[in-house]
Amino acid sequence: MRGDWHTASAPGKFVILGEHSVVYGRPAITLAADLRMTVAVRRSAWNTMNGEKLDFRRQAHIRHLTRNLRHAIDMLTYSEIPVGSGMGSSAALSASMAMALASMEDREMSEEQIMREAYDAEFYAQGNGSPMDASSCVHGGGLTVNMPGSEGRRLWTVERGGRRWEFRDLEVPRMTFVIGNTGIRAPTGPQVAKVHRYMERNSFACEVIDDIADVTIEGGNALRRNDVEALGRLMTQDHKLLSILGVSCDPLNKLVNASLPYSYGAKLTGSGGGGCMVALTDRAEQVCEAIRSRGGTPYVVRTGGKGVSMEPSPPDVPGADR
Ligand code: MEV
């Protein structure tokens, strides 16, 4: 009954500028990281994940991704991406699982089709959000979203709920970024919903979203000029705007403040409420030390990880049968 394993992996991502405002169709800049999520699937008699029987109905992403299967599967997952941390672990799971399932079913899928399947799974599970995480985890490298003046190759356009997002390839900048993880898990959906409620109640919140969009466009110009100092300044400004929106928290602010003396700029990355911050620096060791001294976990990220791709063998998950 059991078939062969089909394994795929996808990178995590971090947002340089524009999270939250991108949900409303505003610009953003995002890079893939060199931390990956790996998913293997094979036909089976029962649904299992990492050796445990699994009720897929309780896992919204997986329920959506497996909706057309006529048989059960064994699934193995292994994540280098910290989960629920704003680094796209859930989009990377959806992207790599979509590719592994297509291989198991002997279906051809283009990069764009995998992105659409991954975004649908994310949207189905979360009920809100933009296609930015799915696009970044599928394409890898660097991306701009709705960025005026962007000269990168157009990848795809997604429309949903009256909003439209155009994705373009971004040449990955030669800059050093350090991620600091607070260790506090904070899923995206509730943070996006919180900002939405704030915007409904208060026109001031809508102005903050406009300000984030302006800062992001300026950041796109700074990137084109390779102007690290300006980009860093804009990242810090973005962090302040995100704090006004209510998506930062004390542990994130502590890591941002600790990194700033050794950085061009620093900000939370992803949906906030916990999770990770990112600093742009050429003093990575000092930033790592500063993050550690405030109880965070630092990663010096190599940017521009490759997009979703097939892997030769399933991950070695302790206790699970390969
Ligand atoms: C999450 O990485 C970024 C948000 O803008 C949500 C989204 O774009 O879906 C907060």
Image (spheres, helix red, strand yellow):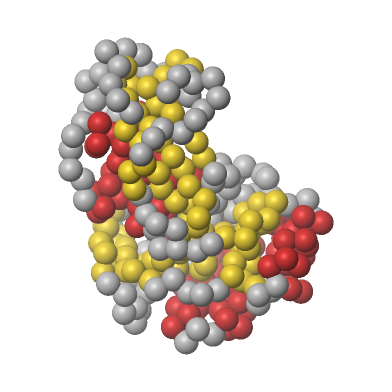
Q: Residue at x 40, y 26 (%)?
A: 75
Tell me the quarter of the image containing the C terminus: top left
Q: Front-most of 7 and 138?
A: 7
Q: Front-most of 105 and 87?
A: 105
Q: Residue at x 52, y 51 (%)?
A: 35
Q: Whole-percent x and y of residue 267?
A: 62, 65
Q: Left of 228 or right of it: where is 181?
A: right
Q: Left of 156 or right of it: where is 243?
A: right
Q: Residue at x 50, y 36 (%)?
A: 78
Tell me the quarter of the image containing the N terminus: top left
Q: Front-most of 322 and 261?
A: 322
Q: Front-most of 207 and 309?
A: 309
Which residue of the protein is positioned furthest toward the front in this rendering? 312
Q: Whole-percent x and y of residue 72?
A: 30, 18
Q: Quadrant of residue 279?
A: bottom right
Q: Residue at x 25, y 36 (%)?
A: 103
Q: Left of 32 or right of it: where is 164?
A: left
Measured along the vertical axis of the image, is residue 66 above or below residue 312? above
Q: Whole-percent x and y of residue 247?
A: 61, 56
Q: Whole-percent x and y of residue 59?
A: 43, 28
